[in-house]
Image (cartoon, helix red, strand yellow):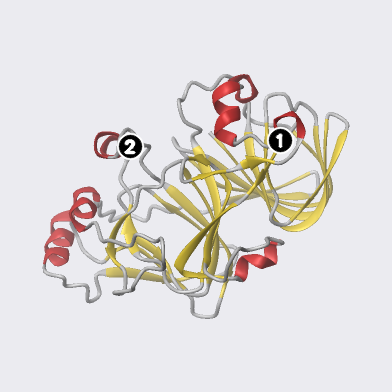
Amino acid sequence: MPLFLRPVFHTKVWGGSNLEQFGYNLPNHNIGEAWGISAHPNGNCEIINGPYKGETLNDVWTNHRELFGDFPSKDFPLMTKIVDANKPLSIHVHPDDAYAYENENGQYGKSECWYIIDAQEDAEIIYGLNVDSTEDAKSKIAAHDYTNLFNKIKVQPGEFYFIPAGTVHSIGEGVIAYETMQASDVSYRLYDYERHPLEGENRELQVDKATDVIEVYNENMNITPDTEMVENHKLTKLVSNDFFTIVKWVISGTLNYMKPREFVLVSILHGEGQVIIDGDIYDIKGGNNFILTSDDLDTVFEGEFEIIISYL
């Protein structure tokens, strides 16, 4: 039986109400993130179906590891979320595993990626720095010389970006993005537009730690996604590395799906239909998130929808 999850909403000074389009009942009009699949303490999703209904994903991960192929990690390794950048996010950077383990109480580092669901005309992201070396970056940051430091890229719906740990980045105003990442909530802010936080928010800068972990990649870290047709459905292989593999399916009709690993994370971006698992039928639509576990052997998708599947 799949594990369907209730999203956890996070209020942000840059958030809005655009995530209502996914059928979410938002608690306020400043929601920046919907954590769709997460067992992290800062957003531990609740199971909403089956024998584990009412338990959190972390509970099930801890007590029923057989559902995940007895995966050896102490913590659930991945997270997914949808981000509504109603205003620009802070300009920030994430540490790698080694730095986070030593400096953030044994947490994962954070490499992540963005699939652009929607973007206003001329919307942009910040991806990397316009310098030749890490030393140049640190010198400019120490002098608060941000003029032309940040590399800005205009984005369009359907684009995909991989952001390895150490890459300075931000999502700009008017972008809705689907994120898959290592299960970490460690961010070091370099610049936050001198904004005042909403009640309950902590928006301090962490410039010292940020400069510790910054990497300057002189080569393009992104890849060209590989697309093929499978049973008349469009499969796009977005990225595959040591942290995660992510694929997008555009399904029209019936797809007989075989899991590539013991468990996979599934998010419905658009459309609606059904997933039939070992003969049991579940209605699915945009905004739904679930995990196919090691118990889910025979899976069929039926309908018209766009989904992203991620796994280790």
Q: Residues within 10 Å of mark 2 (few under 14, many from 20)?
A: some
**Which dot marks residue 97?**
2
* Residue appearing at x 38%, y 52% in the figure: 221
Q: Amino acid at mark 1?
A: Lys
Question: Spatial distance from mark 1 to mark 2, Cα to Cα?
Answer: 32 Å
Answer with the quarter of the image where residue 218 lies: bottom left
190 to 74, vertically: above or below? below
Relative placement, left or right, of 285 versus 246 is right
Quarter placement of the N terminus: top right
Q: Compare residues 264 and 18 and report the one nearer the observer.
A: 18
Looking at this view, name the residue that lies furthest to the bottom. 121
In the rendered structure, the answer to whether residue 305 lies left or right of residue 142 reads right
**Label 1 CA crowd tier, 10 Å (few <14, some 14–19, many 20+):** few
- Where is mark 1, residue-wise? 53
Query: Going from the N terminus, do you reach mark 1 or mark 2 first?
Result: 1
Residue sitting at x 14%, y 61%: 136
Q: Residue drawn at (62%, 65%), measured in percent from left and top?
A: 19
Q: Secondary structure at mark 1?
A: loop
Give residue 277's position: percent from left, percent from top: 81, 33
Q: Position of residue 40 (x, y in %)?
A: 48, 40
Q: Which SS class for mark 2?
A: helix
- Count the labels in the image: 2
Quadrant for residue 201, please give it: bottom left
Residue 185 or residue 153, whichever sits in front: 185
Question: Cβ–Cβ below 8 Å for labels 1 and 2?
Answer: no
Tell me residue 236's x, y (percent). Answer: 63, 50
Give, as a three-letter code, the residue at label 2: Asp
Task: Give residue 196's quadrant in the image.
Answer: bottom left
